[in-house]
Amino acid sequence: MISSIIFILAFGAAIYLFSKNIGKVIRNIKLGKPLDRSDNRAERFKVMAKVALGQSKMVIRPVAGIMHIIVYLGFVLINIEVLEIIIDGIFGTHRFFASPLGSIYTLAINFFEILAVGVIIACVVFLVRRNILKIDRFSKPELKGWPFKDANIILFIEIILMGALLKLNAVEANIEGALEKPFIISQYIAPFFASFNQDTLHIFERVFWWFHILGIFAFLNYLPFSKHFHILLAFPNTYFSNLNPKGKFTNMESVTNEVKIMLDPSYTPATDIPAGRFGAKDVNDLTWKQLLDAYTCTECGRCTSECPANQTGKLLSPRKIMMDTRDRLEEVGRNIDINGEFKEDGKSLLGSYITEEEILACTTCNACVQACPVNIDPLSIIVDLRRYLIMEESKAPAEWAGMLTNIENNGAPWQFSPSDRFNWANEN
Amino acid sequence: MENLKVPTMAECAAKGEMPEVLFWVGCAGSFDDRAKKITKALVKILNHTHTSFAVLGTEESCTGDPAKRAGNEFLFQMQALNNISVLNGYGVKKIVTACPHCFNTLKNEYPELGGNYEVIHHTQLLQGLIDSGKLKVQGGSFKGKRITFHDPCYLGRANNEYEAPRAVIEKLDSELIEMKRCKERGFCCGAGGAQMFKEAEKGKKEVNIERTEEALSTNPNIIATGCPFCNTMMTDGVKHFEKEESIKVLDVAELIAQAQDL
Ligand code: SF4
Ligand code: SF4
């Protein structure tokens, strides 16, 4: 009875905290500019099913991809068991599903146990890749500090949680009358607990049970502060993917308005287009989808490892663009939490986080967009920052300024006369 | 003199004719000495296959692609709206271009500004000519040669066209060898995003050197491209490694024109 009350309180607190933090994330994402992605629902569901559920872009790198699928499957399926734990916790029952499901239950738990071992192995491999092999994409400057720790913490939590699950079953295997027969993996761990007397075993059972479920509550609340948020956000983020060809950059209607007036003074401008800044200087100049992208980023660095600028030693890293966008958005969010509304802090995404040198190095090759396993588009942010730099601050590098003048005056990026444009047809 | 027949839209309009397809030459194809050869190779193929086409000649102007990629949307839209008024004035329906940047811009970015055309890349046109039997291709001097194809970003990833250039190259009875990073994972030549028009930022290597190295590692006789800018970057790369005597950088259109002795 008392344990039921404690459980309900813990469960309630976990859910309350989680919803509060999710609420903040949603508020922050809504700071972004509007963008219509309500079209093509069937196509969107297909993309989500393929990319998020089916992890189609993960397996392009087979080792990491397959390991990741094991962890992901483990995470999703073993959480079915959490449902049972929650029911047991609230009603004080024990293995609620065991008797109604009968042999199917045993089969399921056996499967979960195998999966748990798979998850532990995969997590160990991931730890080795990050900490011992020091794979290039996990050793880039933007991962130093917290992001690096974050990744390790989550891997350890996974291992500990899976361990608790196995140990719980192993202890039960020794408790008289608790199980009809031991489960497939935990039966081999069971002998370690065989020497304890029944009372101690009952205590162990309770300890592992509580540890497992409290661990899961803690994990849930760790998510919004971690790159592991992607386990939830990957779904909406892929659903709202850009369905246009990747080469198509957005059309700026605010510019069309002004250009049409310039070309034809009698043109009556469309009035429903908000004026405001050209391009993006800070996070609130970006669209909500670009901000959702930032929260979804897994920091995997697949983008950066395909980026021609980054791979040839330039400062630009598309992963850093995403991390900077998220960090700045979080900073703006905290500012709003404290002041009720955003109070100017003299900082901005471009300048305080991302430098001109970084965005100027981009070849707009779309390799990052193609590589991203959760359909994030770092390029669109880079382009919006460039637009601000060029159109609002007129800060084009000298060679670009020349190129742009040539286009304006000669209709070509080089200094040739437009009247010579057709000469090629008569040259040898 | 090679005797190219290059009608302009203005001439056609004066005669009351409407060519089937407009050949959009682009700035590189019009002014860059190396790219002009690609332009002429394509014209030879168009002449050879009796394709009804015309160019805009001096009425053509930059699509605005480099301005848009650099972030100058104003200049891009000025260019686009002017070009669209010329194209719509002639009632153009279909456009072919040998530049993936023009291709992408005309195809994807002009419609929202009022320019709606069927736009194809020249490798797609070549594939169509071959498939319909209008263009017969034999390997000629390329028979048995090792050819590697460098995917232009704005044809490949940007517009998902990986097969047309390969289908054309395969007709040459040569050996098409892929680089490790190809198709969806093709590595940029370094020219896109208006990088062509400025020095690269500080780094440890030039992008085109990295890419050329990879192309050379396949031990090719020819590096094939489908973009005048990629062509420049790869040509410079090959020169950097002092391999220009043994390895040629050629556009797919040049491969076809040369194989057929056009
Ligand atoms: S689009 Fe820009 S940031 Fe993305 S991979 Fe290419 S060069 Fe790097
Ligand atoms: S943007 Fe995508 S590919 Fe890049 S680090 Fe984030 S999740 Fe990985």
Image: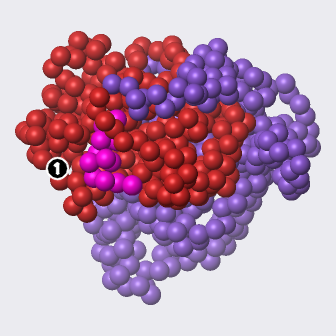
Chain colours: A purple, B red
In percent of width and height, residue A52 lies at 48, 59
Total numbered labels placed on residues in the image: 1
In the image, what residue occupies the spot 79% across and 41% down?
A263
Which kind of residue does numbered mark 1 sit on? Val
Viewer can see residue A398: yes
Q: Is residue A329 above or below residue A76?
A: above
Answer left or right for A5 relative to A271: left
Viewer can see residue A304: no
Residue picked out by circle 1: B137
**Residue at the front extreme of this rendering:** B15
Count residues near mark 1 (Cα–Cα under 10 Å), then give few for <14, some for 14-19, many for 20+. some
Q: Image quarter for residue A166? A: bottom left
Answer left or right for B57 relative to A37: left
In the image, what residue occupies the spot 31% across and 22% down?
B235
Q: Image quarter for residue A336? A: top right
Q: Kindly tell me whether mark 1's CB lies below 8 Å from ligand 1.
A: no
In percent of width and height, residue A123 lies at 38, 45
| Foreground residue among A262 and A226 | A262
Which quadrant: the N terminus of chain A? bottom right
**Residue at the left extreme of this rendering:** B144
Q: Is residue B181 above or below residue A94?
A: above
User: Which secondary structure is most common in the magenta stretch?
Assistant: helix
Answer left or right for A282 relative to A298: right
Judged from the image, the secondary structure of the residue bearing numbered disc 1 is loop
In percent of width and height, residue A53 lies at 46, 63
| Foreground residue among B207 and A263 | A263
| Foreground residue among A80 and B212 | B212
Q: Image quarter for residue A186? A: bottom left
In the image, what residue occupies the spot 45% across and 48% down?
B54
Question: Which chain is mark 1 on?
Answer: B
Provide the residue span drawn in magenta: B40-52
